[in-house]
């Protein structure tokens, strides 16, 4: 399933392909709805507390902003992408499935400043093999979306694919929903997280959860020399966020997560660093507010065509989410 999810196209604002993959798999497990913004919601009715589990369907990508007379296609990033990773990467356009290469002038023609400084994304372009604007317009038009063209590959204990942020969370929700709980639970696959938590804003306002749990793929850089920059490490278990730029986890729920992990012998780690944010940032302050926390799978090379996760981190995150929900079922927060 993770392969199908990461292979699917789903740049922010264009998540239909991902949504259809998920919808087909979950349709028999509860009441399924799609709201006006495109969030996919499965409701398993119960009594008592109202819980919302969220994972975002969208991925970072590109949108066409112009087409040059010589056929080169200009673009802008959708979501946070480091321009330094873009040169020579392969992309595919959603509407026509046209493929292209992100181009830049060769090193032989660069001056000293261009060689020694990060490339400006405004100087990049997509080459689809067209030699004129008219030819390019047969395949691509203004406003078309593109994403990285990348293959799902299993590499020993690791999985490499695009969009593991946050298709890994989407896959975990699809496994968790197969179990039944006494409380009222909403599984929400949100849209447009990468451009401002927009889908979660609408979904949380409608659901009014008392407890919100966000399942994410999060930053990992355990390949650097200095441990102070690690943030998270692959193979060390799911990462628990205490605080980021958009929310502070509820103390009681945070302690409960730690206790559940210890009781079930599930390795966990705390996310070191407070940069970034996720859908918890909007869920926790919707209407009367909600108790929220985030559980994340450490993801190397995030927001790139070759993001990587450790198999055991995925398995342990799934185990932790299931065990936590059973604990919430037994005892009130």
Image (tube, grey):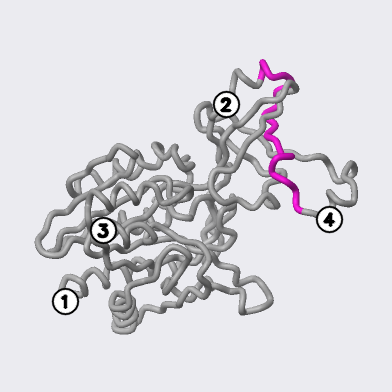
Q: Residue furthest top?
A: 134
Secondary structure of the residue carrying numbered label 4: helix
Q: Earlier in the sequence, mark 4 or mark 1?
A: 4
Query: x, y (%) of residue 123?
Result: 74, 39
Q: Earlier in the sequence, mark 1 or mark 3?
A: 3
Q: Earlier in the sequence, mark 4 or mark 2?
A: 4
| Viewer-proximal residue among 76 and 159 | 76
> Circle 4 is placed at which residue position?
116
Q: Residue at x 59, y 32 (%)?
A: 64
Is 122 a magenta residue?
Answer: yes
Circle 2 packing at 10 Å, graded few (<14), some (14-19), many (20+), is some
Q: Which mark is residue 52?
A: 3
Secondary structure of the residue carrying numbered label 3: strand
On screen, residue 287 versus residue 8, left or right, reads: left
Distance between the alpha carbons at the discs numbered 2 and 1: 53 Å
> Circle 2 is placed at which residue position?
142
Q: Is residue 256 above or below residue 112?
A: below
On screen, residue 135 versus residue 189, left or right, reads: right
Tell me whether the residue at label 4 lies in contact with that at label 2, contact meaning CB atoms closer than 8 angstroms: no
The quadrant in which the C terminus is found is bottom left
Distance between the alpha carbons at the discs numbered 4 and 2: 32 Å
Q: Residue at x 35, y 59 (%)?
A: 172
Tell me whether the residue at label 4 lies in contact with that at label 1, contact meaning CB atoms closer than 8 angstroms: no
Secondary structure of the residue carrying numbered label 1: loop
Q: Earlier in the sequence, mark 2 or mark 3?
A: 3
Query: x, y (%) of residue 245?
Result: 48, 65
Distance between the alpha carbons at the discs numbered 3 and 4: 47 Å
**Residue range (magenta):** 118-135
Q: Earlier in the sequence, mark 3 or mark 4?
A: 3
Distance between the alpha carbons at the discs numbered 2 and 3: 37 Å
Query: x, y (%) of residue 119?
Result: 75, 48
Is 154 a magenta residue?
Answer: no
């Amino acid at each position: 399933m993770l392969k199908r999810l990461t292979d699917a196209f789903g740049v922010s604002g264009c998540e239909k392909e991902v949504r259809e993959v998920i919808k087909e798999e979950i349709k028999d497990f509860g009441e399924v709805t799609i709201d006006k913004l495109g969030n996919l919601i499965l409701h398993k009715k119960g009594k008592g507390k109202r819980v919302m589990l969220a994972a975002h369907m969208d991925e970072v990508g590109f949108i066409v902003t112009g087409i040059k007379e010589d056929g080169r296609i200009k673009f802008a990033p959708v979501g946070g992408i480091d321009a330094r990773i873009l040169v020579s990467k392969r992309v595919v356009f959603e509407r026509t499935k046209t493929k292209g290469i992100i181009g830049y002038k060769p090193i032989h023609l660069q001056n000293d400043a261009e060689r020694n400084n990060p490339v400006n994304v405004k100087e990049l372009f997509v080459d689809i093999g067209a030699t004129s604007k008219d030819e390019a317009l047969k395949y691509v038009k203004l406003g078309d979306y593109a994403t990285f063209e990348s293959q799902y590959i299993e590499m020993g204990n690791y999985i490499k694919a695009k969009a593991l942020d946050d298709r890994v969370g989407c896959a975990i929700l699809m496994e968790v929903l197969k179990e039944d709980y006494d409380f009222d639970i909403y599984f929400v696959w949100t849209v447009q997280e990468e451009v401002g938590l927009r889908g979660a804003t609408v979904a949380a306002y409608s659901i009014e959860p008392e407890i919100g749990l966000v399942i994410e793929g999060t930053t990992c850089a355990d390949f650097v020399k200095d441990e102070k920059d690690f943030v998270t490490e692959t193979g060390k278990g799911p990462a628990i966020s205490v605080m980021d730029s958009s929310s502070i986890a509820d103390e009681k729920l945070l302690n409960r997560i730690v206790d559940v992990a210890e009781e079930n012998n599930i390795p966990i780690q705390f996310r070191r660093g407070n940069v970034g944010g996720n859908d918890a940032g909007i869920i926790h302050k919707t209407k009367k507010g909600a108790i929220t926390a985030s559980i994340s799978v450490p993801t190397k090379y995030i927001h790139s065509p070759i993001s990587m996760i450790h198999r055991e981190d995925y398995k342990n995150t799934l185990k932790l989410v299931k065990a936590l929900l059973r604990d919430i079922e037994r005892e009130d927060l």
